[in-house]
Amino acid sequence: MARERARRVGLTVVGMAVVVLACVLAGVQWFRPIPSPVFRAAVSTSVRLSGSLPSLPWPSTGAAALSVEGAGSLGSAGNTQPVPVAGLAKVMTAYVVLRDHPLAPGAPGPAIAVTPATIAAAQAEAASSQSVVPVVGGESLTELEALQGLLVAQGNDIATLLTDWDASSTTAFVAKMNAAAHTLGLHSTRFTDPSGLDPGTVSTPVDLIRLGEATMAIPVFRQIVAMPQVTLPLAGLVYNFDYDLGHDGIIGIKTGSDTAAGGCFLFEAQQDVAGNTLTLLGVVLGQYGTSPITTALYYSELLVHVAFASVRTLSLVPAGHVVGTIVDAWGGSVPVTAPTSTSIVSWPGLTVPVHVRVEALPAAIPDGTGVGGLDIDLDGHKIDVGLSTARRLPGPSTVWRLTRL
């Protein structure tokens, strides 16, 4: 009997221990942190607008490209290999000078003395019918005047003046130009001189558009290239070779022309459509004929005109469009959608960059809960498309919480 009593007591103790252990384990399981649901995107970093890109009137020779600032390419045509770019090289010359010697809009900047090297360059280039700005020994130009002489009057000798002022030698300055090209991601661009007269200075349409974006972000550069004419100390009134200024919204940037490069034009154009400012950047290279620059300008204006005429109001995200799914660890999932339709003024077929933003997710999510948004930035025009759950996502069940591993 004593032995039986001991056995029963032992079983009771073991049973109690099992119960206590089970309670402890259940408590641990119950109070363990619950993993947050995870959002899995159904869109990457872009949304393609419905329709086909506009059929643009590309030149039949040379190369050309057109891009929407802040959005992407509208297309390209012709040679994609690096080619001579003539005076478009001066855009990088101005970029390096303004990076090293920033100039506020309206400020004249420091005085730059005309050097013997500048005089020699002016004489040599005038003798070979190259573009020069008349200068004399002992004269000084302000930084602003020098940049106007470089970008508006197209002076190759002014490129020499700025090169010597900034880096003391052409070799040192060209090294700066190539370093800046590398920093800007112009991987198919190589500079051998500051004016573009050397045919070894080459680039591609894609690289030049990227350079145009960088330089037009500098306010004083933007002001200079929009000037139809300038008045310089000795040269007097000088007109811009960019005869497209003011046509179809063109506000710059730079022309160039020589035997190796043909006629070239790097340009920016803007137009207000339905309260939105749309910005185009493009380039036309390698145009020849009676007047190579005139041909390049003609195709550039034609491209801009047709591109802006193709602008439409387009659906960016239709109502109910699924942009992702929220998935939980206990086997549930719920679609995330844009509850309302969002439209933008743009071009059919354009790929628009987007950023999916998702907030911290609770374990249980009611139907229609806002969980984040799609952020779109089209050249400063910001759009926020709200995202919400398409139905309820219940929290974990009691069985799952107690039996999970």
Image (cartoon, rainbow, N blue to C red):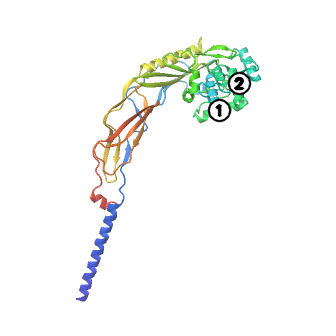
> In the image, is 63 to the left or to the right of 161?
left
Residue at figure coordinates x 33%, y 39% from the top left: 337
Q: What numbered label is drawn on residue 161?
A: 2
Does dot 1 land on a helix, a strand or a loop? helix
Place of residue 129 in the rendered image (x, y in percent of width and height, measured from the top left): 69, 14
Quarter of the figure that contains the N terminus: bottom left
Counting other residues with Cα less than 10 Å from the Cα at mark 1, is it few (<14), some (14-19), or many (20 or more)?
A: few
Q: CA distance from mark 2 to mark 1?
A: 15 Å
Question: Would you name the residue on which mark 1 appears?
Answer: 100
Could you tell me the amino acid type at mark 1?
A: Asp
Nearest the viewer among 28 and 284 is 28
Residue found at the very far top of the displayed protein: 290
Place of residue 171 in the rendered image (x, y in percent of width and height, measured from the top left): 71, 31
Q: Give the number of callouts.
A: 2
Residue found at the very far front of the displayed protein: 107
Residue at figure coordinates x 41%, y 27% from the top left: 349
Does dot 2 land on a helix, a strand or a loop? helix
Residue at figure coordinates x 73%, y 30% from the top left: 169
Nearest the viewer among 342 and 287 is 342
Could you tell me the amino acid type at mark 2?
A: Leu
Quadrant housing residue 149: top right
Place of residue 319 in the rendered image (x, y in percent of width and height, measured from the top left): 31, 34
